Amino acid sequence: MNKEVPQDIPKDLQRIARLLDSQFSIGNFRFGIDPLLGLIPGVGDFISLMMSGGFLALAAKHGASKKLLILMALNVLLDSIIGTIPILGQIFDFFYKANDRNARLMQKYYHKGKYRGDGKDVIVIIIVVLLLVAALFIFLMWKLIEWIAGMI
């Protein structure tokens, strides 16, 4: 079970992480809209990826270093890529919680003085990579729809 989102990171980052990964609960199990969006083939994963990209852009605005942004982007990419796999991806989305992980990385940035530096120059590259991954999702979804339509 993942820990709660830290309470002392900037409120905008806190809200995005919580909304995506831990807004709702059933018993002690917490989840957000990320795994729910993943239930909508293609579109949900795209929306989730863009929201996670927004989290990264805000982290850069709040002074996250290059190393921190790259670590966070790797969390998002792993979540997005595995999240597209039918069934396995949805299960993974409920447990991996990339945005909560990224919030904890920001916690280390604020409390332990880790990952200091300026990462604003690398955020453009990260956003471009995320957009390319999103474009790949759309392309693959289109091909899947064509394939299914061809079988009918």
Image: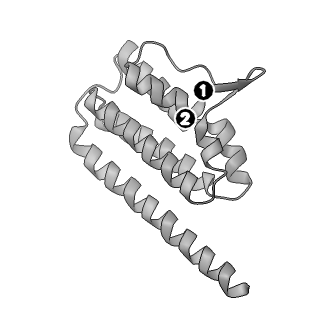
Relative to 100, residue 48 above or below: below
- Is 11 above or below relative to 47? above
Residue 7 to residue 86: above or below? above
The local crowd at label 1, few if under 14, some if 14 to 19, many if 20 or more residues have their Cα within 10 Å, is some
Instruction: State the image coordinates of residue 125 (x, y, percent, origin top left).
Output: 29, 52
Type of amino acid under label 2: Leu
Query: Does the residue at mark 1 contact the one at mark 2 (Cβ under 8 Å)?
Result: yes
* Residue under label 2: 20
> Residue at point 51% right, 34% down?
99
Amino acid bearing label 1? Gln
Q: Nearer the viewer, residue 122 or 54?
A: 54
Q: Residue at x 31, y 30 (%)?
A: 64
Q: In the displayed structure, does residue 19 sit left or right of residue 121?
A: right
Say which residue label 1 marks.
23
Q: Which mark is residue 123?
A: none
Q: Position of residue 131 (x, y in %)?
A: 38, 57
Image position, residue 20 (x, y; %): 54, 35
Name which residue lies at 43% across and 39% down: 71
Relative horizontal placement of residue 109, taking residue 95 as reference (left or right): left
Q: CA distance from mark 1 to mark 2?
A: 7 Å
